[in-house]
Image: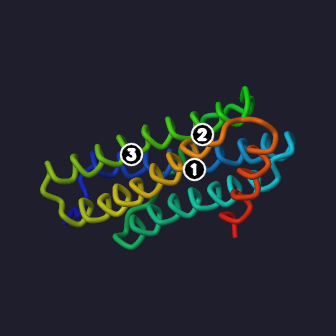
Amino acid sequence: MEMISPNLLELLNYRIKKEEESSRLYGSMSYWLEKNGYFGGAKLWHKYSHEEHEHADKVRKFMLDLDYLPKTLPLEMPDNTFLGIEDLLNQTFEHEQLITKECMELADAAMAERNYMVYGFAQEFVTEQVEELAKTQAHLDRLEAFGTDGAALRLLDNEFAKLAK
């Protein structure tokens, strides 16, 4: 008996690919932050990169537990140039909005097929995205509230370092 349809398997493999690409994007952001003196931010985005890789592994484990072999799909090369910290934060937020939309599409597809096992799994990702959007919005809010002068950016970077622990 097939537990997961070919359509849902394709979407799960796509989720692995997108989580791996998120990991690579946040890795490239971490490198940019470090090169530009945001050492706290570099540590935090490195942590984010690691979390995204763990999300990909979570999907792989889900598939393997149900005796499906995950695919290793080709990955897109992430951008590694940013106009500044505000641009990097905005791109992070836009990326998280895209990932949220994709996670909801996986949940919608599972619900349409009445596959409650995949739906429950997808719901975990949707719930996680609420946290992802909230933390990114909080970074943007701080930047807007306190500005982009050197002292404000230094304090923001110090806060990033605390969050990285």
Circle 1 is placed at which residue position? Answer: 20
Question: Is 125 left, or right, of 24 in this rendering?
Answer: left
Residue type, mark 3 in image: Thr
Residue at 58% across, 34% down: 91
- Front of the two marks 2 and 1: 1
Q: Quadrant of the C terminus?
A: bottom right
Query: How many angstroms separate mark 2 from mark 3 (CA)?
Result: 19 Å
| Mark drawn on residue 75 | 2
Give residue 65's quadrant in the image.
Answer: bottom left
Residue at 52% across, 54% down: 135
Location of residue 43 in the rendering, given as x and y in whole percent from the top left corner: 75, 58
Location of residue 53 in the rendering, given as x and y in whole percent from the top left corner: 59, 58
Q: Nearer the viewer, residue 44 or 17?
A: 44
Query: How many angstroms separate mark 2 from mark 1 (CA)?
Result: 8 Å
Question: Is 69 left, or right, of 148 in this rendering?
Answer: left
- Badge 2: how crowded within 10 Å, few (<14), some, or many (20+)? few
Q: Quadrant of the N terminus?
A: bottom left
Residue type, mark 2 in image: Leu
Labels 2 and 3: the sequence-earlier one = 2
Residue type, mark 1 in image: Glu
Labels 2 and 1: the sequence-earlier one = 1
Location of residue 4 in the rendering, given as x and y in whole percent from the top left corner: 25, 58
- Front of the two marks 2 and 3: 3
Query: How many angstroms separate mark 1 from mark 3 (CA)?
Result: 15 Å
Question: Is 96 left, or right, of 110 in this rendering?
Answer: right
- Badge 3: how crowded within 10 Å, few (<14), some, or many (20+)? many
| Mark drawn on residue 100 | 3
Are the residues at dot 2 and dot 3 in contact (C-beta closer than 8 Å)? no
Labels 1 and 3: the sequence-earlier one = 1
Q: Nearer the viewer, residue 35 or 134?
A: 134
- Badge 1: how crowded within 10 Å, few (<14), some, or many (20+)? many
- Front of the two marks 1 and 3: 3
